[in-house]
Image (tube, rainbow, N blue to C red):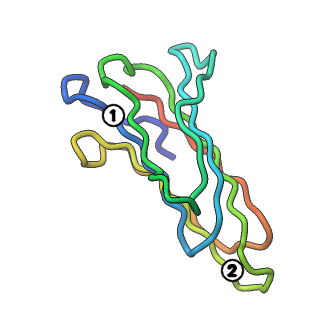
Amino acid sequence: MTTIAKIDKNSGNLQIEIIIGYAQQGRYKIRLWDKDRRNPKVVGEGVNWDEIADTFDLGPANKLINKTLSWDVIVTALQSKSGQFYCVTVILKQKGKPVEGGIFQESGPLEGSKGIFGLRTLV
């Protein structure tokens, strides 16, 4: 499992995008941890059913080197019938393109709710 994302410290800001698929509802929180993986700071949070974009600017890449970015997502099935599925995709981007190691995806069957957690250390 990849836990490192390679960013270009000279290519401007880093963005993160959260995508929740299969028409399921999701709530998420994004945290940035210091170089010692302590002192988390919430840098984004939201839901996927509103009109607000699920993309966040994390600031200049040169200030993010060796910090860790984490996200937790709670996905809830809209219908109670069996056969539901979920898909959560997280993309770290610079200049509109994914960075190396910057794509996280998890999917599978969904009954009720499911918690998803991921992280990347930025190097």
Q: Earlier in the sequence, mark 1 or mark 2?
A: 1
Q: Label 1's element?
A: strand
Q: Is residue 123 above or below residue 55?
A: above
Q: Quadrant of the C terminus?
A: top left
Q: Quadrant for residue 118, please give it.
A: top right
Residue highlighted by disc 1: 14
- The residue at the point 42 percent across, 47 percent down is 55
The reply to whether the C-beta atoms of the residues labelled 1 and 2 are less than 8 Å apart is no
- The residue at the point 72 percent across, 65 percent down is 76
Q: Is residue 24 above or below residue 18?
A: below
The percent position of residue 67, horizontal first and vertical second, equals 47, 21
Give the amino acid type for the residue marked by disc 1 in the picture.
Leu
Local packing at callout 2 (Cα closer than 10 Å; few below 14, some 14-19, many 20+) is: some
Q: Nearer the viewer, residue 109 or 60?
A: 60
Q: Label 2's element?
A: strand
Q: Is residue 97 left or right of residue 21?
A: left
Q: For the residues marked 1 and 2, what is the alpha-carbon distance in whole angstroms? A: 33 Å
Residue highlighted by disc 2: 84
Local packing at callout 1 (Cα closer than 10 Å; few below 14, some 14-19, many 20+) is: many
The percent position of residue 26, horizontal first and vertical second, equals 64, 59
The percent position of residue 19, horizontal first and vertical second, equals 49, 59
Give the amino acid type for the residue marked by disc 2 in the picture.
Gln
- The residue at the point 42 percent across, 42 percent down is 16
- The residue at the point 32 percent across, 43 percent down is 93
